[in-house]
Image: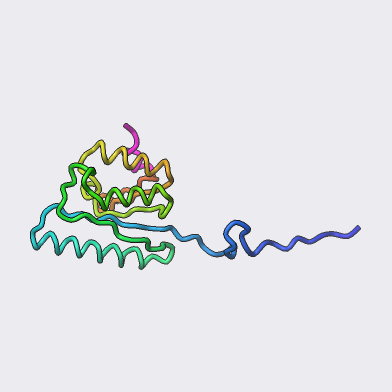
Amino acid sequence: MSTVTKIPASISRYTAAPIDTPIKRKVAAYARVSTDSEEQLTSYEAQVSYYTDYIQKHDDWEFVRVYADEDLSGCSTAKREGFKQMVADALAGRFDLIITKSVSRFARNTIDSLSTIRELKEHHVECYFEKENIWTFDGRGDIFTAY
């Protein structure tokens, strides 16, 4: 009786990529400043530059883009076109991680923040709030979806 030796697959039948190729997270960032003062515009440009560099320095991340809103309040997401486009792109599967400076940069309105984070989480999109060191997929991030 002969023994059949199976040769392990070297290419994924789903993606045609080598099996041992690490899967990179697709990452976007969100930046927002709320006034049109020179200092805030510099902050806006600095945030865009910082997050572009920050994402590109991670070997296991793929940079998608920085979404941004200038001169808009964080109290409501209704008029924040960059924010709305980011959420739409996330829900469409264009990336799976959003990085932003802080919870208050994301949204100051608690209901907007909670409902958006919950919707993103349901679509397997994680948020990382750098200042608070909160990842929405870990235990500390559950506070956002506990309402």
Q: Classify residue 94 as left or right of residue 51.
A: right
Q: Residue at x 32, y 52 (%)?
A: 86
Please provide the residue range marked out in magenta.
139-147
Q: Outermost residue toward the top?
A: 147
Q: Is residue 14 left or right of residue 146?
A: right
Percent across and percent down for residue 114 are: 30, 38
In this rendered view, identify the residue nearer to me: 43 or 133. Answer: 43
Quarter of the picture holding the N terminus: bottom right
Residue depicted at 18% across the width and 56% down the height: 70
Q: Main secondary structure of the magenta part?
A: helix
Q: Position of residue 103 (x, y in %)?
A: 24, 47
Q: Is residue 15 magenta?
A: no
Residue ranking furthest to the right:
1
Q: Residue furthest left?
A: 37
Q: Is residue 83 above or below residue 43?
A: above
Residue 140 location, quadrant: top left
Residue 63: where, in percent of width, then height?
A: 37, 63
Q: Is 107 left or right of 139, judged from the image as shown?
A: left
The quarter holding residue 59 reads bottom left
